[in-house]
Amino acid sequence: MNSKSESIVVIKPKSGWQFIDFKELADYRDLFYFLVLRDIKILYAQTILGFLWAILVPLIQIVIFTIIFGKVAKISTEGIPYILYSTVAIIPWTYMSQAMSQSSLSLVTGQGMLGKIYFPRVMFPLIPVLAKFVDFAISLIILFTALIYYRITPTWNLLFLPLFFLQMICIPAGVGMFLSALAIRFRDVKFAMQFILRMLIYSAPIVYSASSIPEKYRLFYSLNPLVSVIEGFRSCLLGTPMQWQYIFPGLLTSIVLVVFGALYFSRMERVFVDVI
Amino acid sequence: MNSKDMAIKVEGISKCYRIGLKEQVHDSMGGAIIDFIKNPLKNYRKYRSLYKFDDVKDNSFAGSEDVIWALREISFTVHKGELLGIIGRNGAGKSTLLKILARITDPTTGRAEIHGRVSSLLEVGTGFHPELTGRENIYLNGSILGMRKMEIDRKFDEIVDFSGVEKFIDTPVKRYSSGMRVRVAFAVAAYLEPEILIIDEVLAVGDEEFQKKCLGKMQDVGQAGRTVLFVSHNMPAVTRLCGRTILLEEGEIIKDGPSREVIGAYLGSETGTIGERVWIDPSKAPAGEVCRLRAVRARSKNGEIIETLDIRQPVRLEMEFEVLKPGHVLMPHYNIFNEEGIELFSAHDLDPEWRGRHRPIGRYVSTAWVPGNFFAEGTVFVAAAMTTLNPNAFQFCALDAVAFNVAESFGGDSARGDWTKQMSGVVRPMLKWSTEFYPQEMY
């Protein structure tokens, strides 16, 4: 342990706006890794089904939606089997909604640690976003099973998929950073979160098709980043033409969301401990 | 001072907390309903005000009612390799100071410079999760305390060895006894190798043998030339480990010097006597919803406040408190510690007159008698605490409320008898001895 370049930390009241300190975050990568690992490991501790839940939760949702919206309400899906249509949407939606709600409450649930040890606070909302990705990866099994069953051949659209993966992670990260910082001040977030998520599912083309939205509202509608992710997943996986008019506005909103979330979080960071 | 051999430099650090405005109490149904409707707005303002931090430089802020200054203009420097003790009563600002140096909270004004890698140990087992195994928790806790994964890999076997739970290392921690959990947690901390170690009152856990092991380990840390900041109530440990000690009172450093001197001043301080503690200002007194502590006293059987107790004499421990809300069953209790921070015993009110009875509003003095020939020589610290029963709700606890010295008597009529050398043990009861004698038969 010969530290030639001695590290000097200056402690002083912080002021003004600042952004996330990525260099510091990199210094704490080992801890970050272990905390994500912890979240993954404890999630299904003492359950019988364990990681099977990661499959069951979206699967049940898919079945219910297929029965209600596909069979009973007979929503138009442009000729694609409804089960396939909803699967490509529900898999990313399940990830985003779970990551969002856990991330938003991360500071409140982690307040014990918040007051006892220092590490970059922004890790709190980011941990569930990453930990939940494991669930998402597992639930992809359903998706691929459905794709193979319906013999969907991959197209070049698939090359865009990583972009939507990234966007899918960015949305809960941005929302989580903003709402977790808000939730530690106002615990109302915890209650509001429940019905917001329930409403959000209808704000995106998960159970219905985006083409049913009137032309004049399209731009406004597509500002919702969820629309962009869902449409992106559909086009990439099902090989339908890329609906860029639905995708671009949402991509922009996602970027704004992450930047704003990070700024707001950093701004509020210094007083977290004093208000828990 | 040469900046090269400086580890910590603190310059004029102050910290204030906003405690929020007091809740209003209303006496009419109408008032309550109107208040309920206005609540969201009021709550919003209240929680928002907690967040105001930009008006700190304002002088108007300093006089504001809902503000508490936990630290005022603290300045000191610590050399590399120095072991600094920080002592003071509860609420003196020790923990706030450590939290600032550990970067958990920011100071309101002032600045501090820390040269070197810091690990702070404000709690044993931070981040421990009951569902994870011992092994997983060691890695997690180690990285929380600032160790790299490689470092933990290297020290893993030693850590497990130190904790003594080899057999259960792959069992979820929730199945451990609390003693085992503490041992694992402490073992991780013991193998930290930071350049600067910040430790809060964490040695008061585990059994005596384990505590000794930990103190020994800390001594090694000090001898290895690392800087240690150590907050403790354990005065002998501070004296033994730290060359220098800072005494904090109400957020200010009131003494800074060689440990023996500072601790001496601390034990003898506080308006000359430490056998009596009165909270003259009720707003500063330890209090819960139902009652408020007003004074704690240690008296001799003649009613005098004790400073030094003859080991043969009984003590009267008095707790004076006010009941602010009627209709509760109160349970006053004491926790008695010796100077090493070991809890000698706890005592709960047994007065038959008030057992299970609701107490009306008023002032009470609860007295417990500790018999003579019971304490061992040394310093005794008394914590006065209150709990309401059914349902149990903690009201207050004043640690180190009073302290007194117990002095040995060599007159031959104490438990020591004719023995003049060291006597061990945390208490020294006078036992009844008897002897049966069988004279040797003539042969």
Image (cartoon, coloured by chain):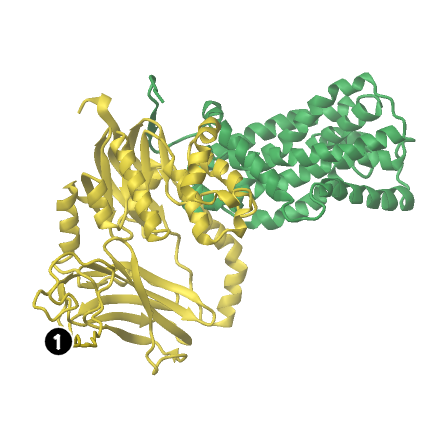
Chain colours: A green, B yellow
Question: What is the x, y in percent for residue B68?
Answer: 31, 49
Label 1 CA crowd tier, 10 Å (few <14, some 14–19, many 20+): few
- Judged left or right of residue A223, residue B86 is left
Numbered disc 1: secondary structure:
loop
Q: Position of residue A233 (x, y in %)?
A: 77, 28
Percent coordinates x, y for residue B442 in the rendering: 15, 76
Relative to B340, residue B404 above or below? below
Residue A262 locus on image (x, y percent)? 53, 30
Instruction: Work out which residue is located at the far left of the displayed protein and give it.
Output: B411
Question: Hey, which residue is sitting farthest front in the picture?
Answer: B443
Q: Quadrant where the N terminus of chain B lies?
A: top left
Would you say B414 lies left or right of B145 here? Answer: left
Name the residue rendered at 91%, 44% in the picture: A71
Q: Chain of mark 1?
A: B
Q: Relative to residue B396, is residue B300 depicted above or below?
A: below
Of residues B113 and A210, the one drawn nearer to the viewer in this rendering: B113
Quickly name the residue at label 1. Answer: B302
Foreground residue, A216 or A81? A81
Q: How many marks?
A: 1
Q: Nearer the viewer, residue A252 or B308?
A: B308
Left or right: B43, with B248 as reference point:
right
Does residue B252 appear in the picture of this structure? Answer: no
Answer yes or no: is residue B356 visible. yes
Q: Residue furthest bottom?
A: B353
Tell me if residue B297 comes above or below residue A57 in the rendering: below
Q: In which quadrant of the rendered view does residue B170 lie?
A: top right
Amino acid on which disc 1 is placed: Asn
Assign the C terminus of chain B to one quadrant of the image: bottom left
